[in-house]
Amino acid sequence: MADKTIMSDIRLAAMNLLAMREHSAFELRRKLARRFDDADIVEAVAVLSAENLQSDERYTEAFINMRKRQGKGPVRIALELKEKGVSEAIIGIYLGTSDHDWFDLALAERQKRFGVAEPQNVKEKARQMRFLQYRGFTQPQILAALKTE
């Protein structure tokens, strides 16, 4: 157990970060590591998680909603969440059972970027497919957005 003063300082720093926005436990530990010892940070973040002040589930939900508003697809969102240290189980739950209609989002993003008309040639179709793939949509979602099944 670390010194109470150090734990209090870590808790205060963590709470300040969490007051600005949700953070994954991994992200919070990484930011706190700039100022504090790793062993103390792990303990402090575990206490915050136990008190439900830090939640990877809440973070995942907020992150998915933010990225969806930006027009990103499920593949890209899942990859970014993994980079933020969120477990694959949590990612699967929130991306798998979310009410997001990824097919509609892919179509909306294609139409926003390229207009409502379908691609007229192979080159344009490939360009639009690359765009949607970069955005993180799956092949079935891309094909549905291009209406080419």
Image (spheres, rainbow, N blue to C red):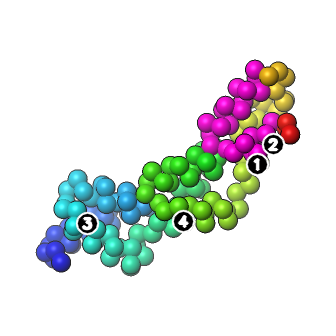
Disc 1 and disc 2: Cα gap in Å?
7 Å
Relative to 118, is 93 on the left or the right? left
Q: Residue 37 appears in which quarter of the rendering?
A: bottom left
Q: Can you say whether 51 is above or below 98 in the image?
A: below
Query: Which badge, 1 or 3, is on the more N-terminal residue?
Result: 3
Which mark identifies residue 90?
4
The amino acid sitting under disc 1 is Phe
Query: Which badge, 2 or 3, is on the more N-terminal residue?
Result: 3
Which mark identifies residue 144?
2
The amino acid sitting under disc 4 is Ile
Element under disc 3: helix
Query: Which badge, 1 or 2, is on the more N-terminal residue?
Result: 1
The amino acid sitting under disc 3 is Ile
Which mark identifies residue 41?
3
Q: Residue, x 54% and y 66% (percent of image)?
A: 89
Relative to 61, is 103 on the left or the right? right
Query: Which badge, 4 or 3, is on the more N-terminal residue?
Result: 3
Query: Which badge, 4 or 2, is on the more N-terminal residue?
Result: 4
Of tags 1 and 4, the one toward the viewer is: 4
Q: Position of residue 115 (x, y in %)?
A: 78, 30
Disc 4 and disc 3: Cα gap in Å?
22 Å
Q: Is 113 or 134 nearer to us in this picture?
A: 134
